[in-house]
Amino acid sequence: MATVKKALLAAVVAAFAAFVGHRFLTLKEMTLASREVPVKDLNCHHLEKIEYGAEDITVTKHGLAFLSTGLKFPELPSFSDEPGKMYMLDLLHPHPTPLELQIKGKLDLSTFNPHGISVYTDEADDSVYLFVVNHPHHNSQVEIFRLLEEDTLVHIKTIIHPLLHSVNDIVAVGVESFYATNDHSFPNDALHLLTVSLGLPWCNVVFYSPEEVRVAAKGFLSANGINISPDQQYIYVSDILDHEIDVFERQEGQQLAYIKSVAVGSLCDNIEVDHMTGDIWLGCHPNGMKVFKYDPEDPPGSEVIQIKNIHSDQPVVSQEYTDDGHVIMASSVAAPYEGKLLIGSVFHKALSCDLK
């Protein structure tokens, strides 16, 4: 009997070791830990004043770019103890320079930690509203601001809700309504890592309005960037660990109906949409392991991917820019505007590039 028990125990230990080894290999595949990409240049220069990341950037139809800077995230490096800041850049100016936005209102600026952002223009009076994902104490909440004058944001509202437990990015669809991605299946990091290791697609997209809050779509390994088509009919979501961009159609009641997925072959972070063409632009991490295991001698690289004709039977996916981390590390967003491209990063610098 003792021999049988020992044999069973040895079999269980061996099976567990095999399972752990398999899941480790799966995580390496998810993070593209062995991937290297050759450098592909654009005509770029570093943006002034942006030294500690511009994790998300979005541009209005009128050429105003908003940048969220100074993100501090538990698993990622940070090179500044200062609170996060918001900047604005006028891309129609002959020499665009980032302008720090002053924030007025009751928001605690000492713990301001901005992440994903979205801009909404109210057609009734052309008022501009800025939605910002904020992690003041490594929790998740959404701040709504109104742009006042040229350099001031007035804080209007803080939104906290149990369904918005691990918000990464946001796309506004009204003055107080939005879709938001949860990049963790559970607020607890250990539980989330377990679900990822097991390949359980338990992350979701949440719709919020003052009248209702609901899960609008689910089935993501890690829902990251989100944005909307120029005609407002479709929502795009980056399932970063699945290396895909998912396309959804907006339905009655703000539910999202899955249409298709487009493989991108990289860990794509935020999504921006060209207002004129509808092309998708993605700031991506060519090797996610290098982001989390930061080594200044072998820094995380950057990659920009464009998707043309995403709604066609044959979308065109192209690599538009890559760097080995010596110009810009850990790119997280690529925002186009009339021949220009802004590239932001999680914790490093930001670039302004010419596409023409």
Image (cartoon, rainbow, N blue to C red):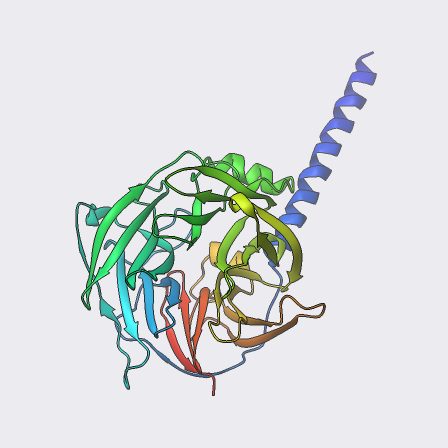
| Residue sitting at x 81%, y 23% | 7
Res. 148 visible in picture: yes
Front one among 129 and 6: 129
Q: Residue furthest top?
A: 1
Q: Is residue 220 above or below residue 246?
A: above
In the figure, 222 relative to 90: above or below?
Answer: above
Image coords of residue 264 (percent x, y): 62, 64
Q: Nearer the viewer, residue 167 or 92?
A: 92
Relative vertical location of residue 33 with respect to residue 201 in this rendering, above or below: below
Q: Quadrant of residue 36?
A: bottom right
Give the residue at x 49% y 56%: 226
Q: Position of residue 347 (x, y in %)?
A: 37, 61
Judge left or right: residue 203 versus residue 24: left
Name which residue lies at 83% across and 11% down. Answer: 1
Q: Nearer the viewer, residue 7 or 126?
A: 126
| Residue 301 pos. (x, y %) | 50, 68
Q: Residue furthest front?
A: 124
Residue 322 point in image, percent of width and height: 52, 75
In the image: residue 343, left or right of residue 126: right
Snapshot quadrant of residue 152: bottom left
